[in-house]
Amino acid sequence: MSDPTAPATPARLPPCPICGRPGEAAFRPFCSKRCSDVDLGRWFSESYRVPDQSEGGQNFDENDPRRVDPDDEVG
């Protein structure tokens, strides 16, 4: 068994998904604020996308009359 009075060693964090350096607990899963901001920028610029799982694999059609515009007033 391990010694309960021994100081706990920090768990090894996976590498930063942006640059590959060791991750830092303060910026988990990234290694720095910079890499965290790079990732956020990729989401904002829509570099990352979730695959469309709509029926029949049809693409989204902005001109579809069934489309609901969140800016339209309802009622």
Image: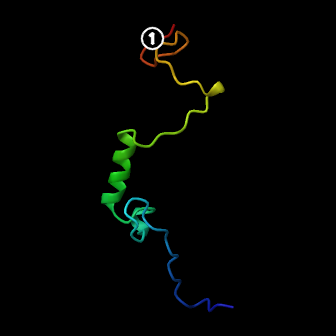
Provide residue 43's location: percent of width, then percent of height: 40, 43
Provide residue 21's location: percent of width, then percent of height: 39, 69
What residue is shown at x 51% (from left), y 83% (from top)? 9
What residue is shown at x 52% (from left), y 23% (from top)? 60
- Above/below status of 33 relative to 6: above
Which residue is at the front of the view, 54 or 68? 54
Q: What colouring style does the render use?
A: rainbow
Give left or right: position of 44 versus 61: left
- Above/below status of 8 relative to 48: below
Which residue is at the front of the view, 63 or 2? 63
Kindly indicate the quadrant of the structure image that contains residue 51. Answer: top right
Q: Give the total number of marks visible in the rendering.
A: 1
How many residues crowd around disc 1 within 10 Å: few (fewer than 14), some, or many (20 or more)?
A: few
Which residue is at the front of the view, 68 or 49? 49
Farthest right residue in view = 1
Farthest top residue in view = 75
Q: Which residue is mark 1?
A: 73
- Above/below status of 33 relative to 10: above
What residue is shown at x 69% (from left), y 91% (from top)? 1
Give left or right: position of 71 versus 60: left
Name the kind of residue labelled 1 in the image. Answer: Glu
Which residue is at the front of the view, 14 or 11? 14
Provide residue 34's location: percent of width, then percent of height: 30, 58
Provide residue 62's location: percent of width, then percent of height: 46, 17
Give left or right: position of 14 versus 34: right
Give left or right: position of 56 versus 14: right
Secondary structure of the residue carrying numbered label 1: loop
